[in-house]
Image: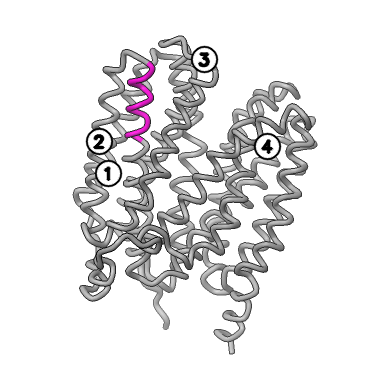
């Protein structure tokens, strides 16, 4: 009987937990800091927006550097450094007394987040058995998706019921748990020869970015851009169509149905290849956006959340697995950081650009437009990766 190598090891659970706690802190602060900075420091709307987004900028800037040094300093060492810096920045929020200081802390905090999440993604890819990588990376990515549902929900509940500083108490607690669980983490050692390749000196483009990630990253930046329209404007859209109560459960449906689909999509990826998962996930993402654009009742908004959860959530983890599979083993860290640079860029630049388009289109037309972009993305995927993946899969079967 053919035994599959074990996926749910102590180390896999610990790195997933650390990742979950990092992302939940990120989302909790993302939804509450704009309001906090207006209330505490009388920030303007644009300054309040900057307090949220400067964090992502810090993460984007540091990721290529983290990807370059990860094999040199060691994956676990880099993660511990990132988590210690993350915790220090969390503690500094308690001392903030001006908006410029808050912006500085947010920027460095983004650095710590970028370093830590580059390390967790690389460690997870390293721990997961190769034959179960699609399934394993799917479950690992679920730690981000769950945080995306729970973080904003928790953040808003705490800010409504308690003083603002309780947000920082909660996120600091999460930082401590993430750090403690990492101390006991065992990371497989990289081959010496592979590490030496990575350590060659010089400042080439390939030292900071993994070229093999670029084809799938084109689609990642497009889908991240589209998804940012939901992250940024869902609340405003729900107010306009009078479905605020249903909107608060949108991300809960997103996470629940994504979790439900995970065992099937992950195994399908490993057995049938990425095309069997990515094409349907892009179709579902597009269909979910159309349902969202036409929502007139709470139930249709929740159905949109479920369909987008399976669609975008599955695409995101599958694309990350593709990025890692395309790279040489000693460049997994760079592949992970390159993937997230593109993803973060799409998520970060989206609200800014869509803010100009929204007054011209309105919400419903905006989401129809986003669906069209996703359907065009199916064609782009075929050109940049799908065609090659299909040939590879046929050869594997033959």
Q: Secondary structure at mark 2?
A: helix
Q: Are marks 4 and 2 in contact (CB under 8 Å)?
A: no
Task: Say which of marks 1 and 2 sits in front.
Answer: 1
Secondary element at tag 3: loop
Circle 2 Cα neighbour tier, 10 Å, few/some/many (<14 / 14–19 / ≥20): some
Residue at 71% x, 44% y is 370
Location of residue 85 with respect to 394 vertically, above or below:
above
- Residue at point 49% right, 59% down? 320
Indicate yes or no whether the magenta region holds residue 100.
Answer: yes
Q: What residue did someone put label 4 on?
A: 302
Q: Magenta segment, which residues?
A: 99-109
Residue 96 covered by magenta stretch = no
Dot placed on the residue nearer the N-terminal end, 1 or 3: 3
Please identify, in this view, whether the residue under mark 3 or under mark 4 is nearer the observer: 3
Asked whether, in this view, residue 121 is left or right of residue 266, the answer is left
Q: Secondary structure beneath disc 4?
A: helix
Give the residue at mark 3. 44
Q: CA distance from mark 4 to mark 2?
A: 34 Å
- Which of the marked residues, 1 or 2, is nearer the chain's N terminus? 1
Residue 82 marker: 1
Relative to 22, 141 lies left or right: right
Contact check, label 1 and label 3, Cβ < 8 Å: no
Image spot of residue 241 (x, y percent)? 75, 24
Would residue 355 be found to the left or right of residue 146 on screen? right
Q: Residues within 10 Å of mark 3 (few under 14, many from 20)?
A: few
Tell me if mark 4 has few (under 14), some (14-19) or many (20+) residues whose alpha carbon lies within 10 angstroms of its own.
many
The Cα–Cα distance between marks 3 and 4, rounded to whole angstroms, is 33 Å
Q: Position of residue 132 (x, y in %)?
A: 44, 69
Q: CA distance from mark 2 to mark 3?
A: 33 Å
């Amino acid at each position: 009987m053919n035994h599959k190598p074990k996926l749910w090891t102590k180390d896999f659970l610990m790195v997933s937990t650390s990742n979950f706690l990092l992302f939940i802190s990120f989302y909790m602060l993302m939804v509450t800091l704009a309001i906090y900075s207006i209330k505490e420091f009388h920030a303007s709307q644009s300054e309040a927006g900057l307090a949220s987004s400067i964090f992502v900028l810090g993460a984007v800037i540091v990721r290529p550097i983290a990807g370059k040094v990860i094999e040199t300093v060691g994956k676990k060492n880099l993660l511990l450094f990132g988590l210690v810096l993350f915790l220090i920045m969390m503690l500094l929020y308690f001392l903030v007394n001006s908006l410029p200081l808050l912006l500085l802390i947010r920027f460095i905090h983004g650095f710590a987040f970028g370093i830590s999440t580059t390390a967790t993604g690389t460690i997870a890819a390293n721990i997961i058995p190769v034959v179960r990588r699609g399934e394993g990376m799917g479950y690992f990515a679920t730690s981000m998706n769950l945080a995306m549902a729970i973080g904003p929900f928790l953040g808003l509940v705490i800010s409504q019921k308690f003083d603002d500083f309780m947000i920082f108490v909660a996120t600091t607690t999460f930082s401590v748990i993430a750090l403690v669980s990492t101390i006991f983490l065992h990371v497989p050692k990289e081959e010496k020869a592979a590490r030496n390749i990575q350590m060659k000196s010089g400042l080439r483009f390939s030292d900071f970015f993994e070229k093999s990630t670029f084809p799938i990253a084109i689609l990642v930046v497009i889908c991240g851009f589209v998804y940012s329209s939901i992250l940024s404007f869902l609340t405003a859209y729900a107010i306009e169509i009078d479905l605020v109560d249903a909107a608060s459960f949108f991300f809960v449906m997103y996470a629940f149905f994504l979790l439900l689909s995970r065992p099937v999509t992950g195994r399908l990826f490993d057995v049938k290849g990425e095309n069997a998962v990515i094409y349907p996930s892009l179709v579902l993402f597009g269909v979910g956006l159309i349902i969202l654009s036409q929502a007139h009742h709470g139930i249709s908004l929740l159905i949109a959340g479920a369909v987008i959860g399976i669609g975008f959530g599955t695409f995101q983890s599958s694309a990350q697995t593709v990025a890692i599979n395309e790279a040489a083993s000693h460049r997994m860290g760079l592949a992970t950081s390159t993937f997230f640079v593109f993803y973060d860029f799409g998520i970060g630049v989206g609200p800014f650009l869509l803010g100009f388009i929204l007054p011209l289109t309105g919400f419903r037309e905006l989401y129809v437009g986003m669906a069209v972009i996703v359907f065009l993305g199916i064609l782009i995927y075929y050109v940049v990766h799908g065609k090659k993946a299909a040939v590879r899969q046929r050869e594997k079967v033959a």
